[in-house]
Image (cartoon, grey):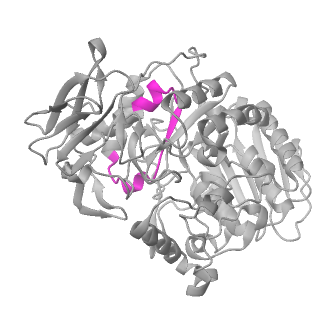
Amino acid sequence: MSAWGPTPTEGGRAAFRLWAPDRDTVTLEIDGGDATPMQRHDDGWFTAEAQAPAGTRYRFRLDPDLAVPDPASRRQDGGVHGWSVVVDRAHDWQHPDWRGRPWVETVVMELHAGVLGGFAGVMERLPEFAALGVTAIQLMPVNAFGGTRNWGYDGVLPYAPAEAYGTPAELKALVDAAHGHGLSVFLDVVYNHFGPDGNYLGAYAGAFFHQDVDTPWGGAVAVDADPVHHFFVDNALMWLDEYRFDGLRFDAVHAIANDAFLDRMAREIRAALPDRHVHLVLENENNDTDRLADGVYDAQWNDDFHNVLHVLLTGETSAYYSDFADKPAERLARCLHQGFIYQGEGSPNHDGKPRGKPSGHLPATRFVSFLQNHDQIGNRAMGERLTLLTSPDKLRAATALLLLCPQIPLLFIGDETGSEAPFLFFTDFHDELADAVREGRRKEFAKFDAFADPEARKRIPDPNAQDTFRRSAPTPGPDAGTWRDLYTRLLALRRDRIVPRLSGAKGIAAQALGDARVEAEWRLADGATLTIVIDLADTPDPLPDHPGERLHAEGNRFGAWLSA
């Protein structure tokens, strides 16, 4: 037995399951109905069947003073400490024939549903995203978390959409509407830890975690245990099959530290959904390329691309940017040519420990690149965007590089309008937990020069303040029209001239031509050569004469050419 969550049976009844190996007895409680003792099986599973049509509220009673929600709850009523709800999984899909889009066409807009007004608010923005030229939206985690506002990485009920964003039916309607606009929809999922508020698993299933394997969030999730494996794989399949998401981004898989789980999960997903474009993307701080070589995972986030460009754009070299402070132009050249910068070299920010594996053999589309994302803005103490940290002409050149180079580009909501609004780290915790999160957040920045002084750290916004969340909503910047025009033109150029040639594109060569000037070349699928020059020096040199067709230029800072 391995399935989690309630399964509807005949006559408005449902079968309930809970893996609670640490318990001798568990009682199913139906709101307004009878309590039903659950049958215990030798493998630690408890089962019961009860009258429970869609809309029924239920929970599991462990002790007279402890009742817990279903860890596989599909919907909550009253937050993560409240009642779980049986849901009707059927949906009247308006675009049932949608099968997704090929990976090479992908241009991602990452967004946070909460700051846009929930699922309904995101739906209102879909025509705008489609007109811009993005081909996919990626939602930061939408699973249920403590309180009413959170980035989503503190989720504790992975199967239940957060109440603050909308209902399961509203989330399905959002995905359906996006497909109607030709947009794929990806979801960020977190399988490496649970949040601190509302995680009851330790009260009845201690074997869900390896207590002897320490992580920043406590014991490591025991994905090698069969019930735990199925908990997450079934969750992934729920989003992809029942909600019809087109792909998943797996958060911080280096913290899972189990490659066998990742490989098995990907194989099971692919086997279950063979007739659709389903895209699986990893975040892995270790720059591990093993999952990418055979294409089981489509790509991995390329933090190196962001980090080296951030150094060149802003001059910042504190904390993890110290890994990219030495010869940043040479490092950017390696990134454009081979994907990752760190491919086994020692990392100063990791006490000289080796980081990464060789990546030059991989196609460029195995890497998702970005100038900004939720982490790289929100994990700044004050949440500043690049519009406030560098000059417009440098940022335009970097944007052209992002959108025209063969790596898969990812934007963060607000980039396209030159937003100057911060994106801050926000939560909705209370009492001692709120104090711990607030102080922990401030201590994180002690390694940064600007916040070495404890008094300076007091200026860092309180994550739990309502105003911190309110300020994080993206608003158009003063030159919104200019930025939108740039993005629209570049994305049209990518769609028409680069994407048809993108399958299998690989770097040919790249070199630094100065302290902040790089030239890179890629061989495209039809044999054509794409050449890009970017110059982020304070005073750039003129662009070179080039025999190819010039696709785009940004003054002397950026040029792109296509040669037969």
Give the camera-side residue of 537 and 236: 236
User: For the point 53% across and 75% down, which residue is it?
Assistant: 442
Q: Residue furthest front?
A: 32
The answer to which quarter of the image holds residue 186 is top right
Give the camera-side residue of 551 and 55: 55
User: For the point 70% across and 56% down, which residue is it?
Assistant: 510
Q: How many marks?
A: 0
The answer to which quarter of the image holds residue 435 is bottom left
Up/down of 289 relative to 118, above or below = below
User: For the point 54% across and 36% down, which residue is it?
Assistant: 166
Viewed as shown, does residue 471 lie left or right of 214?
right
Q: Is residue 407 visible?
A: no
Viewed as shown, does residue 62 lie left or right of 261?
left
The answer to which quarter of the image holds residue 58 is top left
Magenta span = 237-259
User: For the point 41% across and 43% down, which residue is it?
Assistant: 78
- Residue 253 painted magenta: yes
Give the camera-side residue of 293 and 314: 314
